[in-house]
Image (spheres, rainbow, N blue to C red):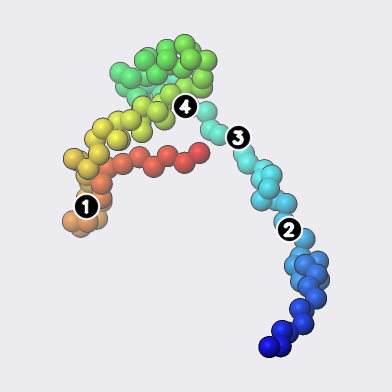
């Protein structure tokens, strides 16, 4: 049985240098929600969220996200929406870190 000779391979000859923009992207800072807007969006939960964030020493965004995902999981598929002509979409929160 004959085995073919291996082909020489040098990655530097075939692949360009990696684009390091993707390793350390320059992102703008996250927008800051004013306390008035926060109170408007979260209504009666705004005070609780602010207090819980202060007690835990965490940004209020983290506590608010936990509340939204927990509420979404509790609601589950028992509620839904129909954004377009009868197409029913489940109510869920998609969290990405």
Q: Nearer the viewer, mark 3 or mark 2?
A: 2
In this image, 63 relative to 86: left or right? right
Q: Which residue is mark 2?
A: 18
- Which sits earlier in the primary sequence, circle 1 or circle 2? 2
Residue at disc 2, secondary structure: loop
Q: Which mark, by number, is residue 62?
A: 4
Query: Which residue is nearer to you in this view: 27 or 93?
Result: 93
Q: Which residue is mark 1?
A: 88
Neighbours of disc 4 within 10 Å: few (<14), some (14-19), many (20+): few
Q: Residue at x 37, y 14 (%)?
A: 47
Q: Which mark, by number, is residue 29?
A: 3
Q: Is residue 41 above or below residue 16?
A: above
**Residue 18 % position (x, y):** 73, 58
Q: Are marks 3 and 1 in contact (CB under 8 Å)?
A: no
- Which sits earlier in the primary sequence, circle 3 or circle 2? 2
Residue at disc 3, secondary structure: loop
Q: CA distance from mark 4 to mark 2?
A: 34 Å
Q: Nearer the viewer, mark 3 or mark 4?
A: 4
Residue at disc 4, secondary structure: helix
- Which sits earlier in the primary sequence, circle 3 or circle 4? 3
Q: Which mark, by number, is residue 33?
A: none
Q: CA distance from mark 3 to mark 1?
A: 35 Å
**Residue 91 % position (x, y):** 27, 42
Q: Residue at x 21, y 52 (%)?
A: 88
Q: Are marks 1 and 2 in contact (CB under 8 Å)?
A: no
């Amino acid at each position: 049985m004959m085995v073919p000779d291996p082909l020489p391979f040098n990655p530097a000859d075939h692949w360009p240098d990696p684009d390091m923009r993707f390793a350390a992207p320059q992102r703008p800072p996250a927008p800051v929600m004013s306390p008035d807007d926060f109170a408007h969006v979260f209504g009666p939960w705004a005070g609780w969220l602010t207090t819980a964030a202060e007690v835990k020493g965490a940004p209020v965004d983290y506590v608010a996200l936990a509340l939204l995902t927990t509420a979404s999981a509790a609601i589950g598929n028992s509620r839904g929406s129909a954004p377009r002509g009868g197409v029913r979409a489940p109510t869920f929160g998609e969290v990405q870190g």
